[in-house]
Image (cartoon, rainbow, N blue to C red):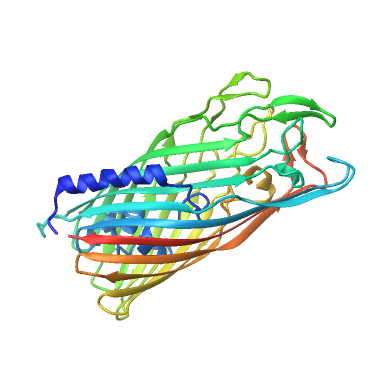
Amino acid sequence: MTFSFPRIASWFATTIFVIVSSSAPAWAQFGLAVAGVGPINRSMGGAAVAAPIDAAGALFWNPATIGGLERSEMVFGTELLIPRTTITSRVGAGMLGPTTLAGTTGGNNGVFPLPTFALVYRPTDKESPWTYGIGFFEIGGFGTNYPVSRTNPILMPQAPFGRGVGPLYTQYQVFQIAPSVAYKLTDSLALGLAANLDLGTFSANPSLFAPPTLLMTPQGPAPVYSSATGGRYRWGGGFQAGIYYQSDSPWRFGAAVKSPQWFETFTYNSVSALGHPTTPKFNLDFPMIASVGTAYTGFDRVLIATDFRFVDYRNTNGFRSTGFDERGALRGLGWQNVFALAAGAQYLLTDALALRTGYTFSLNPVGNAVTSFNIGSPTIVQHSLSLGASYEVTTALKLSIAYVHYFQNSISGPIVEPFAGPVPGSSVRTAVAADSVILGASVSF
């Protein structure tokens, strides 16, 4: 295939349009951060810091590794995500009536398409130390969609008809364009750098992060929150840097750092419970992620890769603080820093067919004590298992498929109200599990 910049630019622009117009919130594993991108990287459990086996995984986890690809490559991928979420809550007798109230509600989530696009170009001049790339990914997010409930206390209507949050809706998406470059210092050592340009969208109903209006009820004053759905995409940015070492031995090593992604303040046009205009605001950034990885190719037709990651939520706007302030507004989600492991293996069954499996583990960033503040951000999955395969239809075209199962995890804690604190005898539990099927194609040139 002959490299044609106008053709590549046209494909890239078309792909970005499709991604922005059709994508849905990612069901992430490292808190809100995705564990990998594209069918090949996902089938390896996301391990890629020292294992450049496709353009998407290389660009996403370590730009220094794009020079390790055998040829220039373009990757298209779509993940079909099927999440399953439930929320259960309980309040004792006398709090909202003469009897104990308890109920369980499932999320109306549906199937989410999550596309991936990546392009790596290696100059035809074999002596050139430079390799170039660009990727477009959804790097993280979360989303919930629960109906109002008369039996599930936390989903009961807001005052004056109840003391819950009403129908709960959240959607947070972060898209990233990552132009990247790698430079070989020696035959074994390469450096990489990416300049990240981000677009983020965040909607929530109700907007617990904004001061509420107080209405009188038979149980006393009760907060009523406006919605935060009348917003727009916000711009953000950051960078990524990496290093990759490949010696004559079977071992490879890599390390990379994704800086925090700093965003404009999210603002919304809304109306209070008394009909007054209001403009909820929330500062929400994306956390820094640091990774180190190793890969081993000492077994015939086998590649084994392992990555270790650190995700810094405690120093990130929107996550470092927690609880309600004196005005009744939520300070933040109160997440903990997490360490994570990604491991994968690839076996070349034939020259055309590759089989893969992967496993990912992450500490849970959401503690039980802050369950009440995170019913709209249930990003608590800790374990996932993946399987995948690729088949080379021709020397230029490869088709790939992967399946990922996210094992169920849950957290539980007391219901916490603004001004009053934890409700005596109350509890709220949120549970999450999911499955994904990822399809993709790689074009080499």
Res 70 quadrant in image: bottom left
The reply to whether residue 398 is in sight is yes
Report x, y in % for residue 142.
52, 47
Q: Position of residue 287 (x, y in %)?
A: 47, 45
Q: Residue at x 70, y 29 (%)?
A: 224
Q: How many marks?
A: 0
Which quadrant is home to the N terminus? Answer: bottom left
**Does residue 269 appear to the left or right of 357 in the view shown?**
right
Instruction: Depth check: give the residue in front, 80 or 87.
Output: 80
Q: Relative to residue 73, is residue 437 drawn left or right?
A: right
* Residue drawn 59% across the image and 22% down it: 278
Q: Residue furthest top?
A: 276
- The residue located at (68%, 42%) in the rendering is 148
Between 86 and 294, the residue placed more toward the observer is: 86
> With respect to residue 72, does 324 lie above or below?
above
The residue depicted at 28 percent of the width and 45 percent of the height is: 14
Percent position (x, y) of residue 221? 79, 27
Q: Position of residue 434 (x, y in %)?
A: 54, 59
* Residue 315 is at least partly visible in this image: no
Residue found at the very far right of the displayed protein: 98
Relative to 298, is 113 above or below? above
Image quarter where the C terminus lies is: bottom left
Q: Is residue 213 left or right of residue 231?
A: right
